[in-house]
Amino acid sequence: MFLKSFRRWIFWVHLIVGLIAGIFVLCMSFSGVLLTYERQLKELSEMQYSVQPNTTIKRLDTDQVVAILQKLKPDEPHIYVRWVNREGAAIPAWAGKYSYLLHPYTGEVVRSGEGAVAEFFHIVTDFHRYLSLVGEAKVIGKNITAYANLVFIFLLISGLYLWFPKRFSRKLFKLHLFLPKHFQNSHHRNRQWHLVFGIWCLPVLFVISMTATIFHFSWANTALYGAFGESVPQPEQHIEVTSLTADVVPYEELFNKAKQHAANNGYQYWYSMWMEIGETKNEARFYIDKSIGNRQELAYSLYFDTRNGDVSKVLRKDDWSLGGQAWGTARFLHTGEYFGFIGQTIAGIASLLACILVYTGIMLGWKRLVVK
């Protein structure tokens, strides 16, 4: 009797809470689908600016790229230069918040800003995180998505409980696991979609929603680091760099040393190499990556002292604390990028199925509450 009453209570809470939060879950799920291949599409948008390799003209060196950026934005010492390991590839570069794409041989600015594709994904990301609210209202949007995500976790757990048939039999389990060949009507179709799609995508959606909590709640980060006996690290404080004049060793020399270091450590086939200067005084950081991005096991950071060219630090994922490693893993499990293209695809399909779950849930709820 208790179990029957408890199941009924769970059902009604699941139904009512789902109807209330469904629209926000739909917003996050649909925008998640759009963000599935963000990294690849942005990369393709930059590839269209590639030029025919020219063996008679030397490509720009790193110091020339930095000089161009300093000329464009003389008050922005914080600089990124991204070298793509492909002949004729355009050079993405940033001076502070200002983004440019440079011709690899002439240094001409072939694109100012991040381009239409990147701007599209900025819009989608803002919708995904803040429901496109801006200014002071941005906090409201962030809180709505944060708590809607918590509600979604409850819906997944309660949905799993309700998914189990009231009577344990092989036939009923099969009905809840697989779609029938034919549907009796639209209500039967919605119910079966909700049951079957829900159970198959539940593990992935649970991981996506649980890892999302670290972006919203301090308690989630405290719990994650605390599981490894650590405290949440505080942001590093650096003395503001106002000029690059203290850098003595040419940046191209550091870039060549970074390439040699990569070759000596099994990264000779790196896909891209980022150089960051101006964040910390007398320091140049090279991020050497075998993938197109966000595969932490396939990348590492190499730090140089710009006064003498010595390697000051090498930082791989294994060098982080266990809590830091867990946070980094959770960060990219959320997008599926931790497992590369396949992981992104699985996350994208699960997000699409979540949209279907919202639709079928609303239709089933409408049928239960309104249609007699």
Image (cartoon, helix red, strand yellow):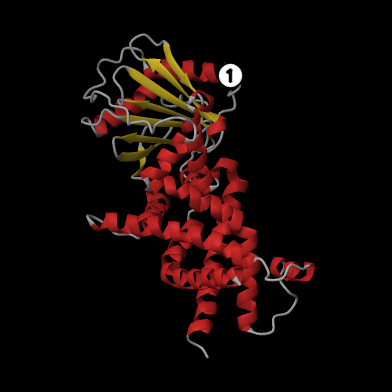
Q: Residue furthest front?
A: 1
Residue at 41%, 53% in the rendered image? 121
Quarter of the rendering occupied by the N terminus: bottom right
Q: Position of residue 322 (x, y in %)?
A: 50, 29
Residue at 58%, 53% in the rendered image? 204
Q: Position of residue 129 (x, y in %)?
A: 38, 54
Residue at 38%, 19% in the rendered image? 251
Left or right placement of residue 231 versus residue 370 in this view: left
Q: Which residue is mark 1?
A: 265
Task: Give the camera-side residue of 70 and 57.
Answer: 70
- Asked if one can make out residue 286 in the rendered structure from this viewpoint, the answer is yes
Q: Secondary structure at mark 1?
A: loop
Q: Position of residue 189 (x, y in %)?
A: 64, 78
Task: Give the camera-side residue of 199 and 52.
Answer: 199
Left or right placement of residue 131 versus residue 340 in this view: left
Q: Is residue 143 above or below residue 246?
A: below
